[in-house]
């Protein structure tokens, strides 16, 4: 009875286990069987490599301590496995030298070149035979089929042809379930990594990967004490013997596939390196600029794009700078338990006791004062203890965050001045606040998206500021947006709303103001506004004084954590008092989009060929027909696949170069020519809206009851008198007025 | 794609082809020696 029960429970377990586990186990068994049946020598090699490692370790220790264990190193001994290395590599260095000379003798001979081109000719013949026999006729048939469809006209809206329906039905029971199963299986493997890790281990044994690794360590240990240069070649020969196993086993087409995948990985890596280099060049450009600067250019010159890009980089630079300075301050008192201070600050921030630099300074200063108080009696001591615990979450004995200053010192001497530990704590706390602040350090009059990922395991948080490797599907979950710039926070005197809660909120961060001239206006436009006016205006609000003093509120450890970046079409649109503070960056021109990833030319040519052919035929097809046919379906699928890949590569690795000129705000100095790089992945990944003020115009347009089609059209090439009057133009109205006046006279 | 870009891409592809032929020639010569 018990046996039946246990059998039933076993059956239940078997049934409830995902069947893909059984497939994985079967594959594991097959791979393991291959190890014994096809690669039995791999065990011999592992044994030999372990022996080599052991003798090398003994040799190393022997030489290190000048001892003699009587064990000779075996790493230079050839394997007993009877393999021949790939590419006929000679066994000894002497043979290799002879062949090396022979190689260069042959290399430059006419016969060798002729033989090579003959070989290529043979290969090309085979290739072209297949191309001519298979691909070209197929393409011709496809093209002719497509053209045949273009000869007949129909209005069968979205109706599918018979062949297309048949193909879709076949795909429904073959391709689609197959594809779904494979993608599900890949997901399954990712969820259960032990399966593929076992496979990797088995194949690492089969292909001598483990042997190569052990032999490398064995030779390293042998070489560092023997400096036996003569036997390096022997190791190369042994390496070639070991890699001849996978080379012989894996078929050539798979090597081509591996080669292509490695080629893709390498070129992507180069692409990312180039993009990061450009980002660093941009950061250098921004660092060279003063705290306030203005980007100018006519419409469509990518001004707002450029300032958004600069603000994004600036925000990351602030975080990087705070991290750099945190480490600098950490090193001043290396034994200080900074984690205690950080945890205390986290608590203070969560209880809103610390929320900006001023409150942070105040918080530490109060703690410092409590530290220095020497209680005169027990009652006062109790009062201090209570206060420390309640207001600062610190026990009295721990009021210097558990730092043993008597042992490790209270002062830091940098040979310029003496700094006590509390001053360093105050600086550290402010830098920590800048580093951990969750919001983007951006304030702007248009929205900018940032996507820094913060990883926090409860210790020191790490920020991932990468701009180029974010997945498009993830950005909605990791995005933060710039803060709404309340201009009252930038006014030192009068405010638009006097009791504005945000009026004193600005301390540090990067400020972005697009179309600054329309906000601040120039002296000519402000002629009628007076400083004495009752209403707040550009002349009496103290905005320019704020700009001049901005670094004072934002300086921590002698570094100003603030920058104001503005844009406008003409520099003169912004009043001279503020403009003279700035540098002006004129955008002269933007280059075409280029690609940071190399070796893409062949695909680009292929794309141009296929897509241009498809676009022409598709336009014609749409004009003639409305149904869906198999050739259209297949051609569209192919063209869209190629187009999607092309777009994705260009969106990831595309960039354009802005040629800019930098001059002083006074516009009387030397003009410097510079370059600024706009990388598509960084700046066009839903970062900002080019029509950031469009909501205003949308509201205006929705009031209208008239569309473009409803507007009156000229009747002829020459406008009639009534048509001219419909323009409501100052010029025409003046003419009409004059005419009517003359008539009256 | 503009004509200029196509020309640049053609030149790049031609350069790549020459590089591949050269690498192929080195490998081919290796085969000749070992024989």
Image: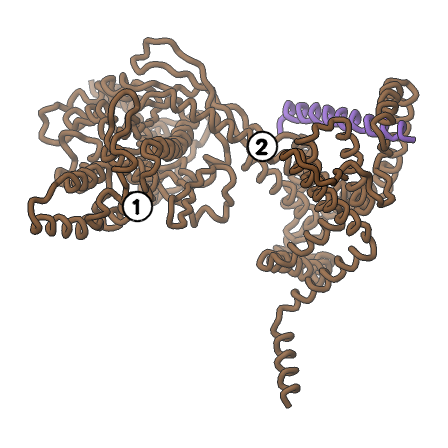
Q: Chain of mark 1?
A: A
Chain A, which colour?
Answer: brown
Determine the colour of chain B.
purple
Residue A473 is situated, as x and y percent measured from the top left of the image, at: 50, 48
Total label count? 2
On screen, residue A146 above or below A159: above
Q: Describe residue A83's horizontal placement relative to residue A606 as left or right.
A: right
Mark 2 or 1, nearer chain start = 2
A335 or A597, nearer to the observer: A335
In this orientation, does residue A492 appear? yes
Are marks 2 and 1 in one subunit? Answer: yes
Q: Indicate the quadrant where residue A501 lies.
A: top left
Where residue A603 sits: x, y (%)? 68, 35
Q: Is residue A527 left or right of residue B13?
A: left
The residue indicated by pointer 2 is A271
Camera-side residue: A338 or A427? Answer: A338
The image position of residue A618, as x and y in percent, is: 65, 43
Say few, some or many: other residues with alpha carbon within 10 Å of mark 1 (under 14 / 14 to 19 / 20 or more): some
Q: Which mark is residue A193?
A: none
Q: Name the side, left or right, on which A669 lies relative to A126.
A: left
Give the SS element for disc 1.
Answer: helix
Measured from the top left, where is residue A73 in percent x and y? 74, 38
Q: Quadrant of the N terminus of chain A?
A: bottom right
């Amino acid at each position: 009875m018990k046996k039946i029960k246990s059998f039933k429970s076993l059956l239940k377990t078997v049934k409830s286990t995902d069947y893909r586990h059984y497939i994985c186990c079967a594959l594991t068994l097959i791979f393991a069987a291959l190890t014994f049946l096809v690669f039995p020598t791999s065990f011999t090699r592992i044994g030999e490599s372990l022996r080599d490692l052991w003798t090398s370790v003994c040799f190393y220790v022997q030489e290190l301590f000048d001892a003699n264990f009587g064990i000779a190193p075996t790493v230079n001994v050839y394997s007993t496995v009877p393999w021949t290395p790939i590419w006929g590599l000679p066994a000894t260095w002497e043979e290799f030298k002879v062949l090396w000379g022979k190689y260069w003798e042959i290399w430059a001979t006419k016969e060798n070149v002729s033989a090579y081109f003959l070989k290529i000719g043979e290969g090309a013949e085979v290739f072209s035979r297949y191309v001519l026999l298979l691909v070209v006729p197929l393409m011709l048939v496809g093209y002719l089929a497509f053209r045949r469809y273009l000869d007949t006209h129909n209005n069968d809206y979205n109706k599918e042809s018979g062949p297309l329906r048949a193909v879709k039905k076949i795909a429904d029971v073959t391709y689609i379930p197959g594809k779904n199963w494979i993608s599900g299986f890949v997901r399954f493997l990712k969820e259960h990594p032990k399966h593929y890790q076992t496979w990797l281990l088995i194949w690492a044994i089969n292909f001598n990967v483990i042997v190569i690794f052990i032999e490398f360590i064995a030779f390293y240990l042998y070489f560092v004490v023997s400096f036996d240069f003569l036997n390096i070649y022997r190791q190369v020969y042994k390496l070639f013997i070991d890699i001849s196993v996978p080379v012989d086993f894996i078929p050539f087409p798979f090597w081509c596939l591996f080669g292509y995948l490695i080629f893709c990985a390498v070129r992507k890596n180069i692409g990312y390196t180039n993009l990061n280099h450009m980002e660093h060049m941009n950061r250098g450009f921004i660092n060279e600029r003063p705290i306030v600067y203005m980007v100018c250019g006519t419409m469509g010159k990518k001004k707002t794009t450029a300032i958004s890009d600069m603000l994004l980089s600036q925000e990351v630079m602030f975080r990087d700078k705070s991290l750099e300075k945190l480490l600098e301050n950490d090193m001043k008192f290396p034994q200080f338990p900074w984690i205690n201070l950080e945890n205390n600050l986290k608590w203070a921030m969560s209880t809103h006791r610390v929320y900006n630099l001023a409150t942070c300074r105040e918080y530490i200063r109060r703690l410092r004062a409590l530290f220095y108080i020497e209680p005169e009696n027990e009652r006062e001591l109790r009062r201090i203890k209570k206060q420390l615990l309640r207001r600062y979450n610190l026990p009295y004995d721990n009021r210097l965050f558990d730092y043993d200053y008597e042992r490790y010192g209270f002062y830091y001497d940098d040979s310029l001045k003496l700094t006590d530990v509390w001053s360093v704590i105050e600086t550290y706390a402010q830098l920590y606040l800048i580093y951990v602040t969750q919001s983007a350090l951006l304030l702007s009059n248009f929205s900018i998206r940032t996507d820094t990922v913060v990883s926090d395991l409860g210790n020191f948080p790490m920020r991932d500021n990468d701009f180029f490797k974010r997945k498009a599907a993830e950005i909605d979950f990791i995005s933060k947006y710039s803060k709404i710039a309340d201009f009252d926070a930038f006014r030192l005197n009068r405010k638009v709303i006097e009791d504005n809660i945000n009026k004193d909120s600005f301390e540090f961060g990067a400020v972005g103001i697009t179309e600054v001239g329309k906000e601040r206006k120039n002296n000519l436009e402000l002629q009628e506004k007076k400083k004495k006016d009752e209403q707040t205006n550009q002349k009496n609000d103290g905005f320019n004084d704020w700009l001049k003093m901005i670094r004072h509120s934002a300086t921590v450890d002698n570094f100003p954590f603030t920058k104001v970046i503005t844009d406008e079409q003409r520099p003169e649109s912004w009043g001279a008092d503020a403009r003279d503070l700035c540098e002006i960056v004129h955008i002269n021109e933007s280059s075409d989009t280029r690609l940071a990833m190399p070796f893409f030319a062949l695909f680009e040519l292929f794309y141009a060929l296929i897509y241009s052919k498809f676009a022409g035929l598709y336009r014609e097809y749409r004009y003639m027909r409305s149904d869906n046919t198999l050739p259209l379906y297949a051609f569209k699928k192919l063209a869209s696949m190629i187009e999607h890949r092309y777009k994705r590569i260009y969106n990831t690795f595309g960039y354009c170069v802005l040629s800019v000129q930098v001059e002083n705000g006074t516009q009387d100095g030397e003009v410097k020519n510079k370059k600024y790089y706009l990388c598509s992945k960084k700046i066009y990944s839903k970062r900002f809206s080019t029509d950031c003020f469009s909501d205003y115009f949308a509201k205006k347009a929705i009031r209208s009851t008239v569309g473009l089609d409803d507007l009156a059209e000229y009747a002829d090439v020459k406008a009639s008198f009534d048509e001219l009057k419909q323009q409501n133009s100052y010029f025409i109205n003046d003419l009409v007025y004059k005419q009517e006046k003359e008539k009256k006279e | 794609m503009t004509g200029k870009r196509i020309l640049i891409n053609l030149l790049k592809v031609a350069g790549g082809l020459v590089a591949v032929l050269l690498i192929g020639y080195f490998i081919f010569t290796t085969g000749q020696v070992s024989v």
